[in-house]
């Protein structure tokens, strides 16, 4: 698939456009000292959707300058939506289905395509995250328009082969046919025959070096350059003109330099802020109504996806402003200060802060069924309205009719005109210009803080700056002047996520000395869902469940503590994308203190939230340890102080880590911590080593019983899920399991936990069973829905057992924690100074250490799901495949409705089921899932499983061996394919 570097790089590149090359897929043109006709590669690139990112535009400009014939698709049409809806998953959001339609059109209208470039945009600033839908575009296309194994077969041995005419299978095809049958292999092959090569680079940053590497790798894969050609990056620049690979690299860098300057240098990343006149021109003339349109760029600029809202208002004389109209530097400060983790939200929040005092109204738009938009559209609208500025929200789907929005658009236009008249009547043009000058580039006090001086103080409260959720949220009693001091006696609560989570948190509280200050949540019910669904109603069901659980526990706590003021601390995990889980803590910490404000003030309580994510462990430990046993937890508190001193550069012993809160037990006043006092010297290297060693030893003592209890609890649960399918007396397994958990709850040392575990297994073993062979399924999916009984309506713990089906859990809490700990270790290693320096040096030479850039959570998911999409997507696919190869007869996929990581994983899981010939049942859960329909689907699925089991019961062992051999062949195919290309 590749030739020598001298053959591939022989054709010179000239800026005038006379270039040569070789197609990586079909071409074979070379130049051996004479002018020859070479194949110009034809490449498709969708400039809708992710095409609005600067990185994709740089890539497009680069390919054009390298002489590639670039075929693009920009504007979505109704036929594209129809095709994408037909071929794509129903769980995909509208823009992702539109992307499938764009690629389908490129393939249909340009069968000569050598490749399609489908960039995975992970981030452009290296700090924020993108949604899951941006992260596996090529994989989505392959699974929607073809088949993963069929695609591999075509890429490895399918060029020019016509299987429809009865041509013989290649070597890989014959190996697969021996295990799955020739008809299946031909079917996969033919489905993917028209899908060209997909080049899928990962974009992590927009800086010059990163984008140069991306462009080079794309072009090298397109032209079929051997990996040995990459050695040119290590050549000294003065040697490159004398070496053929160096000349080729120089041509690539010249084209990239021009493309980068064309796109980035023209308004995205200029070195200095623009002068005032361009911003004044942006807002002029003053007598036109001004509308700020807030939304993702692909929505704002694609008429079909947004009801043509931008052009509708522009044609009627409205000055429509969007974030894309401003240079990046104008929004830079606002982006840096914005809470949250999504890049689109950070940009939108910065734009809102800049435009608050400059426009007559806002419109926030999103896609129906998009969970990130379900949060950020309403959240931004609340911030805007809190400043006294009108804001309207729209969500669009494929069934929208333009006429249906005309009336609302007309109403908004009339309102904007009235606001325009009031603005002109209240401010003269000169005064307005002065105000704009003060607010230039978003640097005025109002724009920087997100407040608006034109709104009377106290009229709506401050909504834009809700503070840092990672530490604590201001509570009701502290928010008013002269309120009572914060009580020292705490009460710790957390949302319900199954009894195993309750066991772990209670055990952690016991080890910290906080057991008497914990209030465990009750299991979820319908009231929990209703309480949690009063806001952000289009969000995923786990948000409603967790929020409703917190509200129920708060109500119970406040009724119990009428005369006992407490410091109520909500424990919550924190996400950092691409899953929307990170939004939960943000909105809960904002709304719950306000919702319970009166009850909190009446009882003298405070309400805070302590969250822990992949980067907030130190703060989280401090929040808990400062409440517990000061003596046993002193090593942890001391290390927290050291970590904070090291990170912020403050004096050792200063700040919260060493003075405030350190060394206090519950109910005690503040005492002088280990570093209290201004005379304490900063710790030396030996002192830091001792503190770190003591910290790890204390943490190990703390974690051992917690981890042992987790393993024991999951072992008991796994055993109960098998026995429930065989129980003779209904409910006997549930009763034994509850007794076993209670024994485990009372055990607090590793020895006691082992004893309780053995006793629990004996209780479960004592359940009367029928002794028959039953079908076994793997249940996997989004972790909250998979592990919380009410969230999946009892599918795992009750309904499958009633149908006499054994259940193996593919999604477990222990697996989730292991992945999280590995990710923390990866980040810590990557951030260490020596490793960081080495990685940066390698990056400048186009070498990426993949495992340090991103954790590979579940390699077994490949080739069915190649790229990490966030959430539990890739682990779900990997666990399912592993369980099927170990003998499971079916797959039950559990996930929230419209969950994007699981929606992308769903197609991959369906392919796993098809390739291994097992039954598949996908169940999505919303707030109002019909239980009767669920039971009917499970009964039908169970009948299918029982019928299949009867067919190959005697050959079960041979079937498992066949699946394992098939898995080895699939892995070998994928490894061979990856060796051929730099990019997946």
Image (cartoon, grey):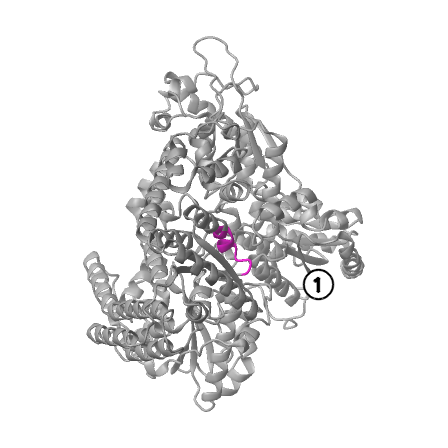
Q: Where is the N terminus found, in terms of image quarters?
A: top left
| x then y, percent, for residue 287 | 79, 52
Mark 1 highlights which residue? 390
Q: Where is the C terminus found, in terms of image quarters?
A: top left
Mostly what secondary structure, the magenta segment? helix
Residue at 59 percent of width and 68 percent of height: 462
* Magenta highlight range: 897-906
Mark 1 burial class by Cα count in 10 Å: few <14, some 14-19, many 20+: some
| x then y, percent, for residue 731 | 39, 78
Does residue 340 appear in this view? no
Is 904 within the magenta?
yes
Q: Is residue 332 left or right of residue 680?
A: right
Residue at 59 percent of width and 43 percent of height: 99
Q: Is residue 808 left or right of residue 762?
A: right
In the picture shown, does residue 309 fall above or below 775? above
Q: Quadrant of residue 661?
A: bottom left
Describe the element under mark 1 as helix, strand or loop. loop
Q: Nearer the viewer, residue 415 or 767?
A: 767
| x then y, percent, for residue 519 | 40, 81
Does residue 266 appear in this view? yes
| x then y, percent, for residue 935 | 52, 68
In the picture shown, does residue 710 fall above or below 154? below
């Amino acid at each position: 698939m590749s030739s020598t570097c001298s053959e591939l790089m022989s054709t010179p590149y000239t800026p005038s456009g006379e270039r040569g090359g070789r197609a990586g897929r079909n071409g074979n043109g070379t130049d051996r000292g004479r002018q020859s006709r070479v194949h110009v590669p034809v490449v498709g690139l969708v400039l809708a959707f992710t095409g609005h990112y600067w990185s994709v535009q740089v890539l497009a400009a680069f390919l054009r300058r390298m002489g590639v014939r670039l075929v693009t698709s920009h504007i979505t049409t109704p036929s594209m939506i129809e095709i994408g809806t037909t071929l794509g998953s129903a769980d995909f959001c509208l823009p992702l289905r539109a992307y499938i339609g764009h690629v389908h059109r490129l393939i249909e209208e340009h069968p000569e395509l050598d490749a399609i470039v489908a960039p995975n945009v992970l981030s452009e600033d290296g700090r924020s995250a993108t949604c899951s839908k941006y992260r596996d575009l090529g994989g989505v296309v392959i699974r929607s328009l073809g088949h993963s194994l069929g695609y591999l077969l075509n890429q490895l041995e399918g060029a020019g082969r016509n299987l429809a005419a009865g041509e013989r299978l290649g070597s890989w095809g014959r190996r697969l046919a021996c295990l799955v049958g020739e008809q299946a292999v031909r079917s996969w092959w033919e489905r993917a025959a028209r899908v060209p090569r997909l080049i899928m680079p990962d974009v992590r940053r927009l800086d010059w070096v990163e984008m140069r590497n991306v462009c080079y790798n794309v072009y090298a894969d397109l032209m079929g350059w051997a990996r040995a050609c990459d050695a040119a990056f290590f050549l000294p620049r003065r040697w490159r003109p004398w070496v053929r690979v160096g000349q080729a690299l120089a041509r690539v860098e010249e084209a990239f330099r021009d493309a980068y300057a064309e796109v980035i240098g023209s308004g995205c990343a200029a070195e200095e802020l623009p002068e005032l006149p361009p911003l004044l021109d942006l807002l002029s003339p003053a007598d036109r109504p001004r509308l700020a349109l807030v939304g993702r760029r692909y929505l704002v600029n694609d008429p079909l996806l947004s009801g043509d809202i931008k052009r509708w208002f522009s044609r009627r004389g409205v000055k429509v402003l969007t974030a894309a109209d401003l240079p990046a530097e104008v929004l830079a400060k606002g982006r840096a200060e914005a809470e949250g983790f999504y890049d689109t939200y950070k940009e939108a929040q910065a734009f809102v802060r800049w435009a608050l005092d400059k426009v007559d109204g806002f419109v926030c738009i999103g896609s129906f069924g998009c969970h990130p938009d379900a949060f950020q559209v309403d959240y931004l609208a609340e911030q805007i309205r809190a400043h006294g500025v009108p804001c309207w929200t729209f969500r669009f789907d494929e069934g929208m009719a333009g006429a249906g929005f005309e009336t609302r658009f007309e109403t908004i236009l009339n309102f904007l005109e009235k606001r325009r008249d009031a603005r002109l009547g209240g401010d003269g043009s000169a005064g307005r210009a002065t105000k704009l000058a003060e607010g230039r580039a978003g640097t005025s006090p109002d724009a920087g803080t997100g407040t608006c001086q034109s709104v009377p103080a106290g009229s709506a409260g401050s909504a834009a700056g809700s503070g840092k959720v990672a530490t604590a949220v201001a509570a009701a009693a502290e928010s008013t002047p002269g309120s009572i001091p914060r009580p020292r006696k705490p009460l710790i609560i957390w949302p319900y996520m199954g009894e195993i989570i309750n066991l772990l948190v209670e055990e952690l509280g016991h080890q910290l000395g906080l057991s008497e200050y914990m209030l465990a949540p009750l299991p979820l019910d319908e009231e929990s869902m209703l309480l949690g669904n009063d806001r952000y109603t289009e969000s995923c069901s786990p948000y409603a469940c967790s929020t409703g659980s917190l509200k129920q526990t708060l109500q119970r706590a406040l009724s119990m503590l009428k005369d006992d003021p407490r410091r109520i601390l909500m424990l919550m995990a924190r996400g950092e994308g691409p899953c929307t889980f990170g939004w939960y803590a943000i909105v809960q910490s904002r709304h719950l203190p306000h919702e319970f404000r009166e009850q909190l003030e009446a009882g003298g309580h405070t309400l805070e939230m302590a969250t822990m994510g992949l980067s907030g462990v130190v703060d989280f430990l401090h929040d808990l340890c400062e409440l517990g046993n000061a003596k046993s937890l002193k090593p942890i508190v001391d290390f927290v102080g050291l970590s904070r001193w090291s990170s912020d550069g403050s004096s050792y012993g200063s700040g919260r880590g060493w003075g405030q809160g350190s060394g206090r037990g519950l109910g005690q006043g503040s005492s002088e911590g280990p570093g209290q006092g201004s005379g304490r010297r900063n710790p030396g290297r030996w002192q830091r080593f001792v503190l770190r060693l003591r910290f790890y030893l204390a943490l190990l003592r703390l974690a051992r019983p917690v981890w042992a209890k987790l393993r024991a609890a999951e072992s008991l649960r796994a055993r109960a899920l098998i026995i429930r399918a065989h129980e003779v007396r209904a409910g006997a397994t549930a009763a034994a399991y509850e007794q076993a958990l209670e024994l485990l709850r009372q055990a607090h040392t590793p020895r006691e936990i082992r004893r309780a575990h053995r006793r629990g297994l004996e209780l479960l073993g004592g359940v009367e069973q029928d002794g028959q062979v039953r079908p076994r399924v793997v249940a996997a999916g989004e972790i909250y829905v998979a592990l919380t009984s009410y969230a999946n309506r009892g599918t795992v713990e009750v309904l499958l057992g009633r149908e006499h089906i054994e259940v193996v859990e593919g999604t477990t809490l222990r697996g989730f924690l292991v992945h999280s700990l590995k990710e923390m270790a990866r980040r810590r290693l990557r951030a260490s100074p020596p490793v960081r320096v080495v990685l940066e040096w390698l990056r400048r030479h186009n070498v990426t250490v993949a495992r340090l850039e991103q954790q590979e959570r579940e390699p077994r998911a490949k080739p069915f799901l190649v790229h990490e999409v966030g959430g539990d997507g890739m682990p779900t696919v990997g666990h399912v495949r592993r369980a099927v190869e170990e003998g499971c007869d079916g797959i039950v996929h559990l996930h929230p409705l419209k969950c994007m990581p699981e929606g992308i994983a769903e197609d991959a899981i369906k392919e796993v089921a098809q390739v291994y010939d097992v039954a598949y049942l996908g169940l999505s859960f919303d707030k109002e899932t019909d239980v009767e329909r669920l039971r009917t689907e499970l009964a039908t699925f169970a009948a299918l499983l029982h019928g299949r089991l009867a067919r190959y019961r005697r050959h079960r062992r041979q079937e498992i061996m066949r699946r394992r051999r098939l898995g080895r062949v699939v892995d070998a195919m994928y490894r061979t394919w990856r060796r051929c290309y730099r990019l997946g």
